[in-house]
Amino acid sequence: DISYKELFENSCSEAFCAGTAAVITPIKSIALEDKKRIFSESEPGEITRKIYELLMGIQRLDIDDEFGWVVKI
């Protein structure tokens, strides 16, 4: 977990949401009251892209699923 304080102190260089349907979705900015933290104006960052490619590779069975996330039905 990351606190709002950490987000606004620039301790993070990227932010994203992760989920089954959303996969990995980059967050461009976060606003809280009168504060706004911008993470990206354009493309997702390097870490976000790497995690996206890893997750998609596992879902497509291009990368071994060492976590047991993919279940054959």
Image (tube, rainbow, N blue to C red):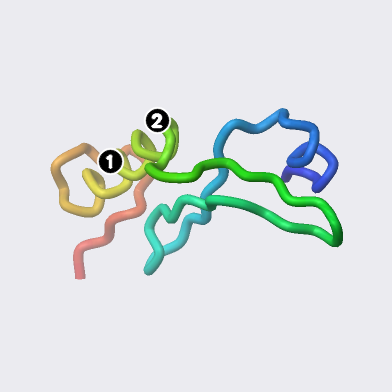
In this view of the protein, which residue sits in the foreground, 43 or 59?
A: 43
Secondary structure, mark 2, is: helix
7 or 24, which is in the foreground?
7
Residue at image mark 2: 46
22 relative to 2, above or below = below
According to the picture, the residue beneath numbered tag 1 turns out to be 53
Nearer to us: label 1 or label 2? 2
Residue placed most toward the observer, 53 or 13:
13
Quarter of the image where the C terminus is located = bottom left
- Residue in front for this viewpoint, 72 or 11: 11
For numbered disc 1, what is the local secondary structure? helix
> How would you rate the neighbour count of disc 1 (Cα within 10 Å): few for under 14, some for 14-19, many for 20 or more?
some
Horizontal and vertical percent position of residue 33? 85, 61
Disc number for residue 26: none
Mark 1 belongs to which amino acid?
Glu
Which residue is drawn at the image coordinates 62% and 44% (left, top)?
Answer: 38
| 2 sits left or right of 18 in the view | right
Give me the residue at 72% from left, 45% from top. Answer: 1
Q: Which residue does the image show at 52% across and 55% down from the upper left? A: 17
Task: Work out whether mark 1 precedes mark 2 in sequence or the reverse, and give the earlier one.
Answer: 2
Query: Identity of the amino acid at label 2?
Result: Glu
Alpha-carbon neighbours of circle 2 within 10 Å: few (<14), some, or many (≥20)? few
Q: Position of residue 32 (x, y in %)?
A: 80, 58
Q: Position of residue 72 (x, y in %)?
A: 20, 63
* In the depicted structure, whether residue 9 falls above or below residue 52: above
Q: In the image, is residue 5 above or below residue 24?
A: above
**Alpha-carbon span between mark 1 and mark 2:** 11 Å
Residue 45 placement: quadrant: top left
Give the percent coordinates (x, y) of residue 13: 59, 31
Toward which corner of the image does residue 53 lie, by quadrant? top left
Label 1–label 2 contact, CB within 8 A: no
Q: How many marks?
A: 2
